[in-house]
Image: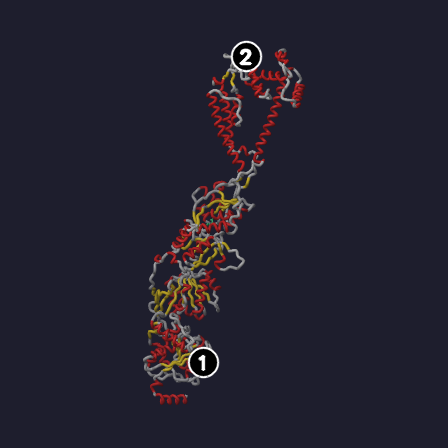
Amino acid sequence: MMSRQIVQYFVVFLFGFQNVYCQKTLGAIFDDGTFLMEAAFTVAAAAASDGSETPFETTVVRTAPGDLLETERAMCSIFENPFFGVFGPTVKGSIEHVQSIADMYELPQILTAPVETQNRNWSAINLYPHHIAYSQVFADIMEMKGWTEFTIVYEGAELLYFLNNILSFEDFDQGEHVVMNFVQLPDGDDYRTQLKMIKSSGSLNYLIACSLEKLTQFLQQAQQVGIMSDNHSYIIMNPDFQTIDIDPFKHGGSNITGVRFFDPSLESIQTFIAALNEKVKELSDGQIEVAVAENGLTFELALIYDAVTLYTTALKLIGNEEGANITCEEEESWSLGSSVINHVRTIEIDGLTGMVKFDQDGFRSDFEIDVLEVVGHGFEKVGTWTGEDGYIEMRTVVPSTEQEGSETMRGKHFIVLTALSAPYGMHKESPAILEGNDRYEGFGIELIEELSKMNGFNYTFEIQADGVYGSYDAKSGKWTGMMEKIMDDRADFAITDLTITAARQKAVDFTSPFMNLGITILYKKPTKQPPNLFSFISPFSLEVWGWLAGAYIGVSGLLFILGRIAPEEWQNPYPCIAEPETLDNQFSLANSFWFTLGSVLTQGSEIAPIAVSTRMAGSMWWFFTLIMVSSYTANLAAFLTVESKFYAIKSVSDLANNPYNINYGAKKGGATFSFFKESDNLLYHKMYEYMDSHPEYQTSTNDEGLERVKSDSENYAFLMESTSIEYMAERNCDIAQVGGLLDSKGYGIAMKKNSPYRQPMSESILQLQEQGVLTRMKDKWWKEKRGGGACADDDAGSGDAQPLVLANVGGVFIVLAAGSAMAVICAFCEMFIDVWAISRKQEVSFREELIAELKFIFSFGGDVKQVRHREPSNSGSGESKKSKKEGDITGDVESLKDEDVKSESPARSERSTHSHHTLHSRRQSNAVQMARMRKYSRNL
Ligand code: GLU
């Protein structure tokens, strides 16, 4: 001690009093591991000395962070010369160690670090804002924002002191429903696990208290995890928030709020940064060119500058005093120490970090701080907080309508909710392990991709695991599924086969529809029927066949009557006799039926009407048969070539009446089910009641519906939307759409009510529609991808003519065979009757006569038949000598000549006709003429 004073006096003698006693040394210990603190400190000291009568010297000792031994040695080395206080260090343990030494020697220790344990009586003067006041800043901001739930993300337990007023609910006016979650960030730089937890908790507001290094990582990973969308809000407590690169986060849509103590654009700040860089360069021997960027000045560096300014100001005010002349070996304290400390606490300066002043407890509680928000162009000051007035917002609200269309979406990040419903959203089939959005593909996925390109937004897909699209639950008064998530801001958009319904439209907004559809039935394809043997009956209904038979009988009867009435039909059988005794009429009852039958079967007959009336009736009948026969032929062709199918249901009314006991249902809580529920149509309402009373027929997904329809063990029809049926019918050839559409509606993208994104998204969808992109996409996902087009050939050839197989025409053969058999039976009956009549008449044995007749028949001995029993009147005439042939003819003619004579009965003439059916008609006609001639000559 003595030797040091001797040296000092010697120095005074050599250099003069002024230079030693008017120069004040400021000691500093910095353990930040850089040159920055030292540079800031020396720059500030130089600035304080500038133009001052008492220049300030600096003694700076750099130590390893947290090394207490080194810190203690540093203190002792500062003690070697008289000094006026010590600045630093910055690491917690070292601060406390220096503090205890400073307390012992009553040395002012000037701190610029967040120290939660401070005491008025201690020697430390801390320029870092007091934690109580600092926490009040954020409590006020949160209150202003109206947060009712939030998650506190913090780095170390010591930072919890700075949350003091936030943790006490009383200070939080809107604390009625305050819900807090705490998440501590782990060591290292991967916080995704914590972020996923935060996300799954459903929390949307986050208060972040962590170091600058962790902050950037945290925000990046929050973006990856998908909690940086429009719905999420962040408040960053770190006062250096403005120094991070905000570009990656400014378009994400989330609200990010922070604070700053100074505006980096101020001239004083920029001058300080320039001097700082200069100093760092000097200290690092030119190795570090630029240590601090234009906006990179940290609060701590600015605080060091302010600390030096404040302290030197106090020293200047105190005047020329003797510095602390102490040693590590002796416990003698600095006599002026406590008065300097007290003096520093009473003055105030306007520093780089705003007004620096202390409250009566010696803490910096009253400060001014800017509140910033991240906007499209970077940071924007939205308010100020002061100890006196609290938080005052001064934001200029830019109405969102001023933003041009898609500009509102550019750069933002959205959570897009989708469901695994083919082909709208599906898991991509890939041998590689996929991540993020790459895991999904489908129509909806591609549509969002297109829309994001057009509007410049980013997105993360989230799957609605339970596949519930959403309906209003009247019991709970809440929406379910995707609707609920959109309404609760848990997702920004929802895209899948999500139907736009009136009820949903009240709760959320929809874009213009990107696809149109209607409700219809999914059911098994109709089963093919085996060909019908009697399909030739099918062209006419039974009713028509009945009317046809009636017309036949009616017209035949009519011709018979007309024939009798019309004088022209009574013809002279012997034209050479002018006044015949009798007249003949061709329209006997039998001939009338024969004539009409001949025309229906397009074979004709030798009977030709003569009178106008009969000709008229006849020609009308021909016309009728022409149309009927051609209609029959045409329809028969169709019936024979078209495969007949069995349709258990053809329309929704078949399903409602349900004659085949088909179970039916729709997707639970889906738009289809709601359609039936809301409908006032009696039929649909009946179906709703059926479905409602059979919850087991409702399904969770469309795929489940499809499986039930296909299942052989169940007779099930599924009510669903036509576009989805189209997709399924392309791949499952055993099912098909049944009946038409019950309604007409569309799918849209859902978003929160009054969303500013509705218009740009709708415009883009319309553009895609006009450019044909949506049609191309539909063809791709419906007909090409994932087995599309599998059933394209299924119905091919059904329109081509098919050769008729026996099964098609077998019935006609049966009729022919049956008719022939009947004819044979008739022929035998006629023969038996004839043989019986002859045997009686000729008084011969029936058996003999029959055997003789059968012998003749089955001898197949030519077409001339010997008359075995001739009439006695004819036996003596010369005609008996005539040839067999002629006799035969004469016998026949005898019968025939009585036919159609006015006085004879039709029954007899008919019998005659039948008994001689074997004669050739031409010969018969000649013979009739001859017989008539003979009869005429006899009469003469
Ligand atoms: N598209 C329907 C909805 O949005 C789901 C399927 C259905 O109900 O048929 O709810």
Query: As rendered, which of 437 and 137 lies closer to the eye?
Result: 437
Query: As rendered, which of 818 and 77 lies closer to the eye?
Result: 818
Q: Is residue 895 above or below residue 521?
A: above
Residue at (47% x, 17% y) in the render: 567
Amino acid type, label 2? Tyr
Q: Is residue 284 above or below residue 921?
A: below
Disc 2 is placed on an element classified as helix
How far apart in space, not on screen, are marks 2 and 1 (Cα)?
169 Å
Q: Earlier in the sequence, mark 2 or mark 1?
A: 1
Q: Residues within 10 Å of mark 1 (few under 14, many from 20)?
A: some
Quadrant for the N terminus in the image: bottom left
Foreground: disc 2 or disc 1: 2
Q: Is residue 901 above or below residue 250?
A: above
Amino acid type, label 1? Glu
- For label 1, being within 8 Å of ligand 1 is answered no
Badge number at residue 72: 1
Query: As rendered, which of 163 and 439 lies closer to the eye?
Result: 439
**Residue 249's image quarter?**
bottom left
841 horizontally vs 676: left or right: right
Quadrant for the C terminus in the image: top right
Report the coloring of the rendering.
secondary structure
* Image coordinates for residue 171, horizontal then vertical, percent: 38, 66
Query: As rendered, which of 51 and 908 lies closer to the eye?
Result: 908
Badge number at residue 171: none
Q: Residues within 10 Å of mark 2 (few under 14, many from 20)?
A: some
Q: Label 2: which residue? A: 936
* Image coordinates for residue 744, horizontal then vertical, percent: 43, 46
- Asked whether the viewer can see residue 883, the reply is yes
* Image coordinates for residue 772, horizontal then vertical, percent: 43, 50
Residue at (34% x, 88% y) in the render: 16
